[in-house]
Amino acid sequence: MEMSSPQPVAPSDYPVSFAVEYPDRKLNRLTTFFRVFMVIPIAIVAALVANGGTFSFGGEEAAWVGGGFGVLTAPLVLMILFRKKYPRWWFAWNLELMRFANRIGVYLALMDDRYPSTDEQQAVYLDFPYPDAERELGRGMPLVKWLLAIPHYFVLFFLYVGVFFAVVFAWFAILFTGRYPRGLFEFVEGVLRWHNRVEAYAFALVTDRYPPFRLRP
């Protein structure tokens, strides 16, 4: 997957930054109406890239078990545990795959009417710094991060229920007005931000800082 140039993201005191550019314009009503069908081809591409794994809203199931063409987790656990190393190309792969998955999630959530690109960031900005594994990552932390993140899984479950209803409401709003209500947009963006922080912490393993329980940057 070709890497794209970094894009500006919302300021944050957490090392994982995420933002979606608000579409301050009329959105395409036709593609909005058929969005659930239009996303299928690129979702299939994402599933194939993830080594045949399932693709879900926001990309949280992009091969968390690690290996193959999904988000690398299991190999990283072993590398950090025994070598205290995080190969830079593995980092680049995880970052770009997460960006790709988020572009699809944002498109499905009606937040952007441009078809998701495989390499350009478009309106979705996701970034996190390359970790110094020797100094910044605890050797044994990758073994327990997925467990420590369990409270976030429960909160995100209910937040995604709210996202579902927010997107349904936004679907009607766009069909009638051409606009995505800003309050709903910021809520969905916040949930995706929260989700990406948890994924970067527990599965991409780029930081040992525990994700905050908040929607804002």
Image: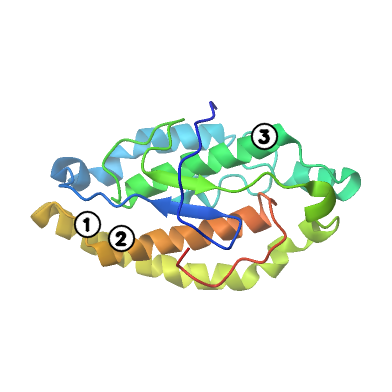
Q: Position of residue 68 (x, y in %)?
A: 67, 34
Q: Which residue is mark 1?
A: 180
Mark 2 packing: few (<14 Cα in 10 Å), some, or many (20+)?
many
Foreground label between 1 and 3: 1
Q: Is residue 138 above or below residue 75?
A: below
Q: On the rendered structure, is 185 left or right of 176?
A: right
Q: Residue at x 39, y 34 (%)?
A: 42
Q: Is residue 53 visible?
A: no
Task: Check disc 2 and give the amino acid type.
Answer: Phe
Q: On the rendered structure, is 51 left or right of 10?
A: right
Q: CA distance from mark 1 to mark 3?
A: 37 Å
Q: CA distance from mark 3 to mark 2?
A: 34 Å
Position of the N terminus, as image quadrant, is top right
Q: Is residue 85 above or below residue 190?
A: above
Q: Which residue is mark 3?
A: 68
Outermost residue toward the top? 2
Task: Check disc 1 and give the amino acid type.
Answer: Tyr
Q: Earlier in the sequence, mark 2 or mark 1?
A: 1
Task: Indicate the secondary structure of the residue bearing disc 2.
Answer: helix
Question: Do the residues bearing badges 2 and 1 touch, measured as CB atoms within 8 Å?
Answer: yes
Q: Position of residue 206 (x, y in %)?
A: 68, 50
Report the front residue among 22 and 199.
Answer: 22
Report the front residue among 8 and 27.
Answer: 8
Q: On the rendered structure, is 76 left or right of 36?
A: right
Foreground label between 3 and 2: 2
Looking at the rendered structure, which numbered label has been put on residue 185?
Answer: 2
Mark 3 packing: few (<14 Cα in 10 Å), some, or many (20+)?
some
Q: Earlier in the sequence, mark 3 or mark 2?
A: 3
